[in-house]
């Protein structure tokens, strides 16, 4: 089996998840990691990674890598992804692809010119039940779409003592909740329906004008309130309500919050049709609710014998053995590397083009919030 040498840039929460997921894919070798924090070197060695760099550009130039995984803060995505492409590396980037749609479009064109493959980590689409929903919409089992309702609720920024780099727009972007978790909502809707979101009406909410930044800080970790802190201006939204319109004219609603007490990673998708309705909950990812008008409703489990043909390949465990977040993360990467090995075929990971369009949707939401009206995405 031909080995594929991969480098990971950024070793925060999500970077470590990428390393673990890559280790589960046969033939993929994490040859090197780059992170500006020198303390990350010890973690690399403990996890069998022999090469560590503080400068990702040196890593890319020296290691002769096939692909780069960009797990850096949003503000760095343009530079990291561009430099990787310019050096002949395929790129699998965290979202957003870039903070500005113009830059995302440039990356799409650069990847095409270099004949390289670009992917974006939108892992929820790689759940078996999301694949099943897409197949049922495509094959007509659902009927004509009548209803779209999505919510993504978290509480990790509920207190003013909760802080993360995403709060500062020069690092995280002009949008936070919408760009961060809203992008998953947009992608799932478009993926399941095979339609683009063409217009949006959005309203944002910001709970705090300032937040406390402590000297020690890491995403999703509790803060010791005895530690010294500084107050930092909050420059983007904590929650949002968004109405959307698809190409076919179907309307839908999205409710997003990072300040909803008790909701940890509560991502729900409901698609209603003239024949049946389908509902999926990310926190119970191996089950799909199927709603009927004239007969009993169903709970479908993620087992190969219950799923449509393509969705079966995303159900890797026997019935009753739940597949979850890490499985979907790994599956997206598997699809990406399948296309690297077989570039004439198209696989179902999120592409650079998908990532580019998501930046357009986020920008339209920001503009809609500012102008208080429907905004076209195109």
Image (tube, helix red, strand yellow):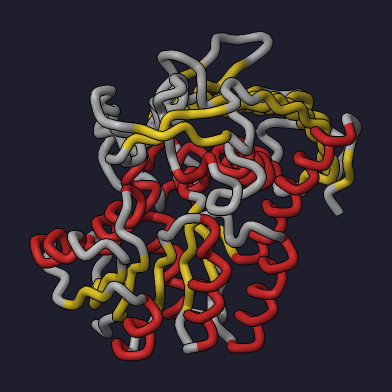
- Give the percent coordinates (x, y) of residue 189: 66, 39
Left or right: 194 as drawn, with respect to 14 = right
Q: Residue at x 85, y 41 (%)?
A: 199
Left or right: 360 as drawn, with respect to 340 = right
Observer-nearest of 146 and 72 = 72
Quarter of the image with the C terminus is bottom right
- Give the percent coordinates (x, y) of residue 4: 31, 80
- Give the percent coordinates (x, y) of residue 42: 12, 62
- Give the percent coordinates (x, y) of residue 222: 28, 28
Q: Residue at x 59, y 64 (%)?
A: 351
Q: Quick check: can you spot residue 149?
A: no
Observer-nearest of 198 and 235 = 235
Observer-nearest of 124 and 209 = 209
Total tally of numbered discs in the picture: 0
Q: Quick check: can you spot residue 290?
A: yes
Instruction: Decide: is 28 above or below 348.
Output: below
Where on the picture, by quarter, is residue 352?
bottom right
Left or right: 84 as drawn, with respect to 365 = left
Where on the picture, by quarter, is residue 151?
top right
Q: Residue at x 45, y 78 (%)?
A: 340
Quarter of the image with the N terminus is bottom left
């Amino acid at each position: 089996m031909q080995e594929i040498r991969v480098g990971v840039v950024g070793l925060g929460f999500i970077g470590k998840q990428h390393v673990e997921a890559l280790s589960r894919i046969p033939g993929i070798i994490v040859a090197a990691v780059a992170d500006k924090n020198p303390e990350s070197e010890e973690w690399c060695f403990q996890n069998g990674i022999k090469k560590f760099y503080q400068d990702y550009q040196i890593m890319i130039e020296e290691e002769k890598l096939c692909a780069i995984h960009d797990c850096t803060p949003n503000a760095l995505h343009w530079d990291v992804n561009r430099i990787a492409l310019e050096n002949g590396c395929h790129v699998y980037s965290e979202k957003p692809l870039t903070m500005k749609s113009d830059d995302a479009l440039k990356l799409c064109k650069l990847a095409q010119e270099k004949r390289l493959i670009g992917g974006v980590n939108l892992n929820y689409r790689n759940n078996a039940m999301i694949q099943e929903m897409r197949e049922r919409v495509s094959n007509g089992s659902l009927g004509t779409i009548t209803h779209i309702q999505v919510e993504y609720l978290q509480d990790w920024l509920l207190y003013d003592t909760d802080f993360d780099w995403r709060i500062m727009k020069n690092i995280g972007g002009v949008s936070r909740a919408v760009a961060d978790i809203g992008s998953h909502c947009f992608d799932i809707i478009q993926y399941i329906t095979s339609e683009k979101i063409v217009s949006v009406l959005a309203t944002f909410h910001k709970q705090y004008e300032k937040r406390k930044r402590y000297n020690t800080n890491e995403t999703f970790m509790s803060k010791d309130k005895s530690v010294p802190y500084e107050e930092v201006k909050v420059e983007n939204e904590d929650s949002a309500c968004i109405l959307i319109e698809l190409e076919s004219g179907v309307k839908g609603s999205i409710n997003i919050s990072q300040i909803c007490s008790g909701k940890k990673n509560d991502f729900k998708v409901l698609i209603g049709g003239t024949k049946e309705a389908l509902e999926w909950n990310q926190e119970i990812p191996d089950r799909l609710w199927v709603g009927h008008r004239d007969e009993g409703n169903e709970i479908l489990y993620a087992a190969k014998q219950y799923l449509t043909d393509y969705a079966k390949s995303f159900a890797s465990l026997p019935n009753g053995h739940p597949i979850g977040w890490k499985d979907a993360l790994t599956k997206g990467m598997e699809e990406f590397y399948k296309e690297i090995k077989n570039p004439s075929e198209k696989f179902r990971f999120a592409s650079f083009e998908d990532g580019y369009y998501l930046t357009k949707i986020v920008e339209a939401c920001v503009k809609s919030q500012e102008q208080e009206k429907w905004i076209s995405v195109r």
